[in-house]
Amino acid sequence: MLLFLLRRTVGFLATLLAISVIVFAVMNLLPGDPALTVLGIDSTEDARAALRAQMGLDRPAAERFLAWIGGALVGDFGTSWSFGVPVAGLIAERLPLTLSLAASGMVVTLVVALALGMAAAANHRRPGDWAMMLLSQLGIAVPAFWLAILLVLLFAVTLRWLPPGGFPGWGEPAAAASSLILPTISLALVQSAVLARVTRSAALEAMRLDFVRTARATGLSPARILWRHVLPNALAPIVTIVGMQFAGVVTGAIVIENVFYLPGLGRLIFQSIANRDLITVQALVLMFAAIVVAANFLVDVAYVLIDPRLKARAT
Amino acid sequence: MSRPPANLLLGGALVALAALAALVSLVWTPFPHAALDVANKFAPPSAEHWLGTDQLGRDLVSQLMVGAANSLAVALAAVALGGGLGTALGLAASAMGGWVEDLAMRICDLGFAFPALLFAIMLAAAFGPSLANAALAIAFINVPVFARVARGAANQVWVREFVLAGRAAGRSRLALTLDHIVPNVAAAVIVQATIEFAVAILAEAALSYLGLGAQPPSPSWGRMLAEAQTLLWIEPMLAIWPGLAIVVTVLGFGLMGDGLRDLADPRLVRER
């Protein structure tokens, strides 16, 4: 077990390193001159050279990479070219909003998907099952950002119950929460369509096993069999998809923040692209990719914890 | 063989509808898609403008048709490029085996760390946003997907008797791959391609919505939605049609993929 964890951790760290190399390589193949972009075409060559030196662009790529990754390890992502403040500070300011959105999106996804998936499995080949399958087939085809626009149309434009976008800041908790309701639903509904289907088929698989028949024979209630016996045995495929979906929720949050004008990391990426603020984009892309890899790493570990049969093999 | 599955027929019909709109748009649209007619802005549906016009008086049907062409072209390019590269990589990995296979699959694992959106963001930041960069980003994420599918299917074929017989007869791995492995993994790859078409169309729509895809005046369903969002209070229907177009096309490819999988592997049908 310890050896398994050690191997996975080493693999995880190696992946992180490889990702940072890829991000750095793609971002530094840049054909343009960032100094020219920042200063404009009327600037003198001397001024541009001075700015390049200040940005560190005159040093060899390998040295810049080591400096960048060394700084990133201690939380120093350099200074934003467009905001003129440390990138780490920009991220710290906006991270809580993005994390809140991703976390609430993931929770709602889980609740909706488990409820629908288990209900469909319990009603296998009955109208409730077909309705769920139809709904989820449709849900997979709906882009989250379009669902978001439709929700704004209904709840903000027509009914005027919720704000169409923007964020009042954490100082007003009630207003902040209500401005996250529509973004959370848009993010979660589409994700839960996939997860509900996986939950349903995993549960159907588990329901075919002998112990379920035994449990029925001993007179346990159907609900107790479903949640206490079927679900734990159906968890492995569900956890795999949840790990992949966490990536979907995090990148989905980038899109949804832009639909609702929420000042999180997703908005920051697009402001930075517009400003050609490469050092900020680079830090953010690395961070998002690292979150995705970390989620998959945790799923790998969770797997072994869920399934004791794997634990025996993992030692 | 019995009647084709219902989801294949329905999916095929929806896809045919989108493909027809895209093909016809190459030679004819009711109006030039970018033609401005400000006097006629926000026109309601009529015999002339079937779905009305937008805030600049542009005909909605014409824009949706050209949008279909853009969307399908990006999906086709992305799936062909990413699927081709990925399948070749997967077949090569399976044929070589050993450390080459391990290395190829590790590299593929890395690819999964970059969702299409992140890759498109990097490309847009470094090279500027364009439809071609969006296609490239979507192609990139398809490489590991197809490599895994092709390798998995090929590994099952390499241990079959007829392939072992071929090896015993001294045929090269390349010749065996072309003659025996490719025909046997084709079904799995085609099913995956259909599903990835749906994924690619969703991804293109999202990228164009965010401004990382089609650039004005080239119409795209995603960009039409981005413009319509600012006009929700004035003309909500502008935000309905492009979204429906996306859903119909994605649903079509999704159903078609399910149907093809049922045909390719009938054992799965009883599971649902």
Image: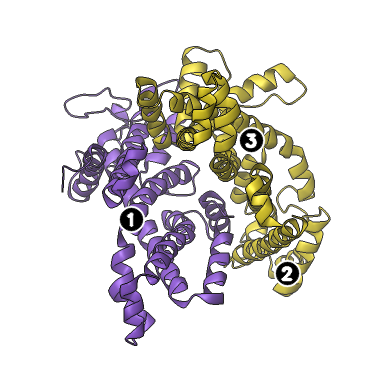
Chain colours: A yellow, B purple
**Quarter occupied by residue A35:** bottom right
**Do badges 1 and 3 share one subunit?**
no
- Which label was assigned to residue A102? 3
Chain identifier of the residue bearing label 1 in the image: B
Three-letter amino acid code at the position of disc 2: Ala
Query: For the residue labelled by badge 1, is the local secondary structure a helix, a strand or a loop?
Result: helix
Proximity of marks 2 and 1: CB atoms separated by less than 8 Å: no
Which of the numbered marks, if any, corresponds to residue A49?
A: 2
Spatial CA span between label 3 and label 2: 42 Å
> In the image, is residue A47 above or below residue B53?
below
Of discs 1 and 3, which sits in the foreground?
Answer: 3
The residue labelled by disc 1 is: B76
Cα distance between the residues tagged 1 and 3:
32 Å
Look at the image and tell me whether residue A182 can be seen: no
Residue at the image point whose x is 81% and y is 52% from the top: A75
Residue type of the residue flagged with mark 1: Leu
Q: Mark 3 belongs to which subunit?
A: A
Residue B256 or residue A45, whichever sits in front: B256
Q: Secondary structure at mark 2?
A: helix
Q: Earlier in the sequence, mark 3 or mark 2?
A: 2
Identified at 69% across, 44% down, the residue is A305
User: Badge 2: how crowded within 10 Å, few (<14), some, or many (20+)?
Assistant: some
> What secondary structure is found at the residue carrying circle 3?
helix
